[in-house]
Image (cartoon, grey):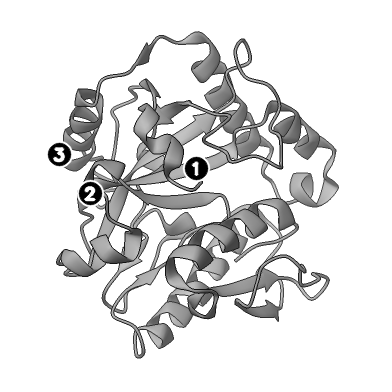
């Protein structure tokens, strides 16, 4: 589901459409004021009533709606991927398998997650995003983020929590070969412009926006790791360290590890 997000939505549709076929993409535009973009292929698109105005209420309604749609799709498909327009599920290129090839090979009992990488702009090394080029040709630093280790691949009719961060009454399982790349924080000027977007500000997202800017600060100023062992360590922490009030969500124990993504991912098509 997207709102006022044509740039990321077009990238999302191009990426998943190439892998899965446009006819297998389902997009819901949040609000009757939305206009169907021209550059998202032959995906299935529906404009729906806006799912609330304030962020907490809107997220609950949005994910309730999307859980219902996913349940309907599971009558036709073996698996459903649910994610936001700035999120891209990637198979480790070392396997030389496409996303559908890999998902067809593994057993998904209820859900699986990819390890979350939240890309930021390294202000000392990287320019503003060139919209004509791929993300991974311009960005290589990311925060290893439990927030984006989302339960986005499901095999059963479940209820997602806000933001796809968990599924109710079920554990999560992080696949060793899957990564979820988030690019919503990959351009400093675009994030700053959000402070002038009254639709965004009135929804109560200012605190959320400041957290996003913190990712750019961390990427720019913290030391980084460039060994694949850091991925293994992050998976272990997120799998075995939980908070009592959120046992079915991954946790990084406040570690803010920055990774320079290995060059092999440059050809991932994102």
> How busy is the neighbourhood of tag 3: few (under 14 within 10 Å), some, or many (20 plus)?
few
Name the residue nearer the viewer: 18 or 183.
18
Q: Which is more N-terminal, label 1 or label 2? A: 2
Instruction: State the image quarter where residue 43 is shown.
Output: bottom right
Q: Nearer the viewer, mark 2 or mark 3?
A: 2
- Disc 3/disc 1 C-alpha distance (Å): 23 Å
Residue 250, position as x, y percentages in the image: 28, 43
Name the residue nearer the viewer: 90 or 201.
90
- The number of numbered badges drawn on the structure is 3
Residue receiving disc 1? 182
Tell me the tag on residue 252. Answer: none
Residue receiving disc 3? 240
Q: Which is more N-terminal, label 1 or label 3? A: 1
Q: What secondary structure is found at the residue carrying circle 1?
A: strand
Asked if the residues shown at circle 2 and circle 1 are in contact, with their CB atoms under 8 angstroms apart, the answer is no
Q: Residue at x 59, y 72 (%)?
A: 27
Residue receiving disc 2? 174
Residue 262, position as x, y percentages in the image: 35, 27
């Amino acid at each position: 589901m997207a709102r006022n997000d044509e740039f990321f939505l077009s990238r999302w549709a191009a990426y998943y459409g190439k892998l899965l076929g446009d006819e297998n993409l389902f997009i819901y535009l949040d609000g009757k004021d939305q206009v169907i973009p021209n550059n998202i292929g032959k995906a299935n698109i529906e404009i729906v009533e806006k799912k609330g105005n304030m962020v907490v209420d809107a997220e609950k309604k949005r994910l309730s709606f999307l859980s219902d749609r996913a349940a309907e799709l599971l009558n036709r498909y073996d698996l459903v991927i649910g994610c936001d327009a700035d999120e891209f599920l990637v198979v480790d290129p070392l396997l030389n398998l496409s996303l559908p090839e890999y998902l067809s090979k593994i057993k998904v009992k209820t859900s699986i997650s990819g390890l979350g990488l939240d890309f930021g702009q390294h202000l000392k090394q990287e320019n503003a995003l060139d919209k004509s080029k791929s993300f991974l040709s311009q960005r290589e630093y990311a925060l290893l983020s439990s927030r984006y280790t989302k339960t986005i691949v499901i095999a059963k009719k479940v209820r997602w929590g806000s933001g796809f961060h968990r599924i109710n009454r079920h554990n999560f399982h992080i696949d060793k070969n899957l990564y979820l790349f988030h690019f919503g924080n990959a351009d400093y000027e675009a994030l700053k412009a959000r402070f002038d977007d009254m639709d965004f500000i009135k929804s109560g997202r200012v605190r959320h926006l400041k957290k996003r800017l913190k990712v750019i600060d961390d990427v720019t100023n913290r030391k980084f790791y460039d060994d694949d062992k850091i991925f293994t360590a992050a998976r272990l922490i997120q799998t075995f360290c939980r908070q009592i009030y959120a046992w079915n969500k991954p946790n990084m124990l406040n570690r803010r590890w920055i990774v320079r993504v290995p060059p092999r991912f440059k050809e991932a098509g994102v």
